[in-house]
Amino acid sequence: QVQLQESGPGLVKPSETLSLTCTVSGGSITNYYWAWIRQPPGKGLEWIGNIFYSGSTNYNPSLKSRVTISVNPSKNQFSLKLTSVTAADTAVYYCARGGRWTHMWGQGTLITVSS
Amino acid sequence: DIVMTQSPDSLAVALGERATINCRSSQSVLYNSDNKNYLAWYQQKSGQPPKVLIYWASTRESGVPDRFSGSGSGTDFALTISSLQAEDVAVYYCHQYYSTPYTFGQGTKLEIK
């Protein structure tokens, strides 16, 4: 059974870079799209972007200048970097599988931006 | 960006009764070349990640009870729960994957009356 697990620091200071990794277990990262989606506390879902295992990416233009999604097939991982964070970036960050609808999700990790 | 608007924002339905959640997209999500609606529905229970219920507007995900059904085409869609169960209490989201950036509706909170 494929499982996804997000990892990273729970607290990031304003203006710094948020870095998260998603580890895929129980299956291969190849031949699939992988996505990052976030949810501010008590609010709705925002699609950040996705990446094919080969490395091609799609980003949300609202974040595009600050976002980088990368993949490491040898480690069965993909990652998210978000630069110049502010309090507005405080959210639960989910990694997920799927290039269209997302049919497999990690449990999510709360990232708080605060000094 | 395609804006997804759900109605109502919240809904209270008695156990065993029908619940219907609506979703409207700001432009059509029907792709003419394959005649498919690029729309999905998710259920999110408190403290959990979302779970896909429906994709291609009306295809039920494996393992999803058949009391859940999706309908609609173009810009207007609905998620119907034919007989509400206690475990269906959740927030429900529609999601378009017709064009990037993919977008979600604001969510509909479903409660028991």
Image: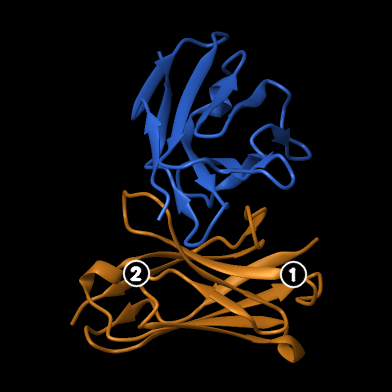
- In the rendered image, residue A30, in percent from the top left (x then y), is placed at 79, 77
- In the rendered image, residue A17, in percent from the top left (x then y), is placed at 34, 88
For residue B46, above or below residue A66:
above
- State the SS at label 2: loop
- Which of the numbered marks, if any, corresponds to residue A32? 1
Give the colour in which the image draws chain A.
Answer: orange
Q: Residue furthest left?
A: A115
Location of residue A34 by image quarter: bottom right
Chain blue in the figure, letter: B
In this rendered view, identify the residue nearer to me: A80 or B111.
A80
Residue at 72% across, 83% down: A54
Disc 1 from disc 2: Cα separation: 24 Å
Q: Amino acid at mark 2?
A: Ser
- State the SS at label 1: loop
Identify residue for label 2. Answer: A62
**Crowd band around label 2 with a 10 angstrom C-alpha radius: few (<14), some (14–19), many (20+):** few
For residue B72, above or below residue A86:
above
**What is the quadrant of the N terminus of chain B in the image?**
bottom left
Q: Nearer the viewer, mark 1 or mark 2?
A: 2
Q: Amino acid at mark 1?
A: Tyr
In this rendered view, identify the residue nearer to me: A71 or B15.
A71
For residue B24, above or below residue B15:
below
Residue at 72% across, 88% down: A75
